[in-house]
Image (spheres, rainbow, N blue to C red):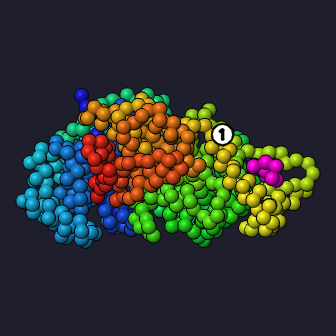
Amino acid sequence: MGFSELSIILGGPQGSGLETSMLALSRALAYRGYGILADREYYSNIVGRHSYIHMSVSSKRIPRSLTYPVKLLISMDAETVFTHFRDVEDGGILVYDKDTRIKKIAEIPSMEDSLKSRLIRDLKTLGIGEDLESITEMLRSRGIVTIGTSFQVILKDLMKIYGIDPRSLSRYVSGIVTSSASLLLGLDREALRYGFESVFSGRPKLVEQNMFIADVVWRELRSYEGLLKLEDSEIDFDELLVATGNDVVAIAKIVSGLRYQSYYPITPAADESFFLEKYEVSELDGSVIGPVVVVQTEDEIAAINSAIGAALAGARSATATSGPGFDLMVEGLSWAGMNEVPVVITYYQRGGPSTGLPTRGSQSDLLSSVFAAHGEFAKVVISSGDHLDAFYDTILAFNIAEKYQLPVIHLLDKFLANSTSTIPLPDLDNVKIERGLKPVPPGEYKRFNLETLVSPRAPLGTPGIIMWYTGDEHDEHGHISEDPDSRVRMYSKRIEKLKLVDEEIPGDLKLRVHGDGGGDFCLIGWGSVKGAALDALGEIVRRSNLRGVYIDVKMLWPFPRRELAEVIRRSGFEKIIAVEHSYGVNIADLAAMAAGIRIGKRIAKFTGRPITLGELTQALEKVLTSDIEYVVISYGE
C-alpha cells in the first residue's frame, strides 16, 4: 500500500535552483504516469529571498487544487523551515540541511521583519526556542519524521569527483532536493534520470553530476526509501504534457497560426514570449508554415502598436503583458477598437495597484479589462480556468478577433502562468482555425463598409487596393469625418458587433456549469479559482451534506447575461456566492450590472497566494451556515 495523493513543499532562496528541482521532479513523476500540479511562489528579487514550490501529486487524477497541510517539506535553508514548519501535517516528513540546525530566526537577514516578529511571538506562546534545532524537536514530538543530512558533505564529494569550482557548488543543491523527494516517494532511478535529462537536455555532464548526487543521497538516506511511496498510477492517458501556463499559451499560439508576437519584459507574462523565442517554428512535418516573429519592444506602448501594425498587414498578431504594461497599452487598444483591428492581448494579472506584488497573483483587473479605454467600442474579454482551458481559449481568442475584427483580451493570472501541471495532450481534432476572411468585392474598396457589421478586410499592401487608417472618426473609406449622421452609423456599427458575438458564440464557451445542475448553493467565479472551486464542491458534500454547482464564467465581456440568468432561474439556488482573487470580488458587480443578478455572498483572497482547497471549503461552510456575507481568506506565506 502507498499514498494515492499527497502534498509537498520544496523551499529555498530565490535563484537557488528550486524551479529546476520542480521541473525535474515533475517530469520524473509524469514519466511514471502521476498527475501533478505545482505552484511556484517567489519574491520580486533575483537572488536571496524565500521561494517555494507547493505541489500536489496524485496516482488517480490530475490535481486541480493545492492543499495544506503538506506531507513532505524539503528545505534548502533554515528560513524555509521557519516559514513552513506549521504547514507540515502530523506524521509528515521534514528533510533539512543539518548544518543549519543552530540557526535562529533573528539571524535570517532575508526574512521580513513582520514575519520574524509573528513567528517569534508564536514560538514563545508555544514555549519553543527560536532556533532550528528547537523547532525540529517540536516537530518530532508531533510524530513528524525529521531527516537531517549534510548538504555540504554531499557537495564536497561532488566537487572532489568532478573538480567543480567551490563557488559553483550551490547550483547543485537542487539535485539534493530532487533526489531526496524521489527517494521518499519511491521513484526509481530510471524515472529520476529521465527528469534530469529532460531539464538538462543536451548537457549530459550535468545529468551525470546530478545522478552522482542521487547516488549519495540514496546511500545517506536509504533507511527512509519509499517512506511516502506512491501507489501505482491509475491515470489513463497514453501521453501527458508537463508545462506551465505560460508554455501552454505559447504552444497554442503556434498551433493557432501566430505570426507576430510583441512584448516588453514584465512578470509574469515574459516567460510566454521567451518560450516562443526558444521554440520558434517555421517548418512542421516538412511543410513550411512560416516563422513566428517575436519582438521585444522598448515599452508596452510600442508592443501594442507594433502588434496592431502586424495585424493590419494580415498577420495573426498578439502581445503579452501584465497590469502596469496593460495600462500603457490602453490608448493603442482604443485605436484598435476605432479601426476594427483583430489583435489579441494576453493579459497575465498580478497583484496591484502600481507595482504592487509583481511576482504574486491576482484577479483584480477584471473591471479594468472590461472597461479599458476611452469611448465605447467592441472588444471581447475571455478567461481560462486551467492549463487545458488555456490552450483552447488561446485559439478561440484569435478566432474571435479575426472573425469579428476587434481586439480580444485573454485574461489569465500569475497562478496559472507560473504553475506547472500534467495535462493530456490537447485534441487537435477539436481545434478549428477561423480567420473570418471574406473576399474583397470588385469595385471601389470601402474598408469600413456600413452595409455589414463585419466589413471585408484586405491586408495593407494588397495590390490595387487603397485604404486609410486614422485615430479619428472616419467614413467608410477611412477618411476623417465629423459628420453626425456618419458618426452615429459608424459608431453603432463597431459596437453592435458585440451582438453578433453574443448571438453566435456557443453557450458552453461563455460559461460552464460544473455539478448536477441543482442543489443548495451556486458558486460563481472565473479563471484560476476553478480547480479549488470544483474540489470544494466535493468537500462540502462530504463534510456538510450540502450540494452545489460551480459556474465558471469564461466570456467576461460581452457578459453572458442570458445564460447565467437561465442557469440560476432553472436551478432555484437558495444561496449564490462569488469567489475571486480580489478585495471586491468584482465578478459579482459585473453580474449585477450586466445581468441584474445580485450575488449576496462573496469570498475574497488578495494576499497574492493561490486559493487552496481547505481554505475555500472553510469559507464556503462559513457563508453557507451563517448570515456572514463577506469572507476574506489569507493562508499561505
Residue 576 is left or right of residue 217, and the answer is: right
Between 333 and 272, the one nearer to me in the picture: 333
User: Is any part of residue 249 visible from this angle?
Assistant: no
Q: Quadrant of the N terminus?
A: top left
Expressed as whole percent of the image width and height from the top left, the position of residue 436 reads 73, 44
Q: Which residue: 28% across, 40% down?
A: 6
Q: Quadrant of the C terminus?
A: bottom left
Q: Secondary structure at mark 1?
A: helix
Q: Which residue: 16% across, 42% down?
A: 91
Q: Which residue: 32% across, 66% down?
A: 49
Expressed as whole percent of the image width and height from the top left, the position of residue 83 reads 23, 59
* Mark 1 lies on residue: 504
Between 94 and 580, the one nearer to me in the picture: 580
User: Is any part of residue 366 visible from this angle?
Assistant: yes
Between 34 and 152, the one nearer to me in the picture: 34
> Which image quarter: residue 575?
top left
Q: Which residues are magenta?
A: 449-458
Between 538 and 262, the one nearer to me in the picture: 538
The extreme right residue here reads 443
The extreme left residue here reads 127
- Give the residue type that dot 1 points to: Glu
Q: Is residue 502 magenta?
A: no
Residue 560 is left or right of residue 39, and the answer is: right
Q: Residues within 10 Å of mark 1 (few under 14, many from 20)?
A: few
